[in-house]
Structure formats: C-alpha cells, structure tokens
C-alpha cells in the first residue's frame, strides 16, 4: 500500500472517503455529490488532468468540508451556504476527537432559531 504525503493531491474517491460521503444502502462512495458541489460553489477548484481525472488540494478539501458541514450538518440550502462562504466572516471548522465538526457560526444560528421558536410559542398562548 502506498502512503501519500498529506500535501499530495487527493483523488475524488479519496476525498469522498475523507468527507465520509458513503451511500448507506450500497456502501459505495458518493463522488457525484462532490462533482455536483463543484458546479454550485466557485470555491471548489480541483485540478483536472488526463482523462478528466480530478485531483484536490488540501485547501480545496477544506472548502469541501465547510460545504458538507453547512449543507449536511446544518441543513442549509445551497444559496444559504454560498452566502456564508462568500461572507467576510470566517467560518472556522475544528475537527473534534470524535470526528464531529464544531463551528462558532452555527451556535449563533441555532440560538436565533430557538429564540424565534420561543417567540412563536408565546404568541400561541
């Protein structure tokens, strides 16, 4: 087995493994998800070499992690995720020991949602 350096470019399959994009029914990698995100997010720029093979740098993989976090974990729409990625506020993701991701940005959003729900409940009474 060949071990790649952390700085080496990764194939789309390797990136799908890193992001844990696995089809739960079939157990296969969802590489099509990454290709779809490439079309929607200008920040995702793989190097496309011979035979249309995609190779991703660590910077691009970090962007993909943010996109996955915003879309899959936070349930944002594509337009909402684009706004976050295009904003001046930095979205810092920290991988925790249990491989979950923590983002300061999401805490504020959750608190706003909870506050809104509380206001709605008070109006119902």
Image (tube, rainbow, N blue to C red):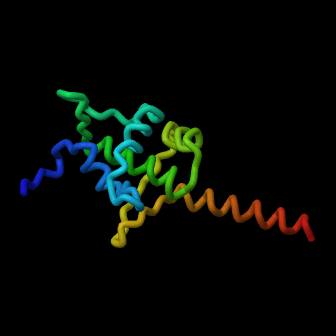
Q: Quadrant of residue 99?
A: bottom left
Give the residue furthest to the right: 125
- The image position of residue 46, as x and y in percent, is 29, 34
Residue 78 image point, x, y percent: 55, 41
Q: Is residue 58 above or below residue 73?
A: above
Residue 101, position as x, y percentages in the image: 42, 62
Instruction: Check the image and name the residue furthest to the left.
Output: 1
Where, quadrant-wise, is the N terminus in this rendering? bottom left
User: Which quadrant holds the C terminus?
Assistant: bottom right
Task: Look at the picture and state if 69 lies above or below 36.
Answer: below
Relative to 112, is 57 on the left or the right?
left
Closer to the camera, 112 or 54?
54
Q: Position of residue 73 (x, y in %)?
A: 50, 58
At 35% from the left edge and 58% from the top edge, which residue is drawn? 20
- Report which quarter residue 10 is drawn in: top left
Q: Is residue 85 left or right of residue 44?
A: right
* Residue located farthest toward the front when viewing the structure as drawn: 26
Foreground of the two, 58 or 76: 76
Picture residue at 9% right of the left edge, 55% below the top: 3
Residue drawn at x 74%, y 63% as measured from the top left:
115
Relative to residue 16, is residue 125 drawn left or right? right
Say if 121 sits above or below 51 in the image.
below
Count the marks: how many? 0
Q: Residue at x 79, y 67 (%)?
A: 118
């Amino acid at each position: 087995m060949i071990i790649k350096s952390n700085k080496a470019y990764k194939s789309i399959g390797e990136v799908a493994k890193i992001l844990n994009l696995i089809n739960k029914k079939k157990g296969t990698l969802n590489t099509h998800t990454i290709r779809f995100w490439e079309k929607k997010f200008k920040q995702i720029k793989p190097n496309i070499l011979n035979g249309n093979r995609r190779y991703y740098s660590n910077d691009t993989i970090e962007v993909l992690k943010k996109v996955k976090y915003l879309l899959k974990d936070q349930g944002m729409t594509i337009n909402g995720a684009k706004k976050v990625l295009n904003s001046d506020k930095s979205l810092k993701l920290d991988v925790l020991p249990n491989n979950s991701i923590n983002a300061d940005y999401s805490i504020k959003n959750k608190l706003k949602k909870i506050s809104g729900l509380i206001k709605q409940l008070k109006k119902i009474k």
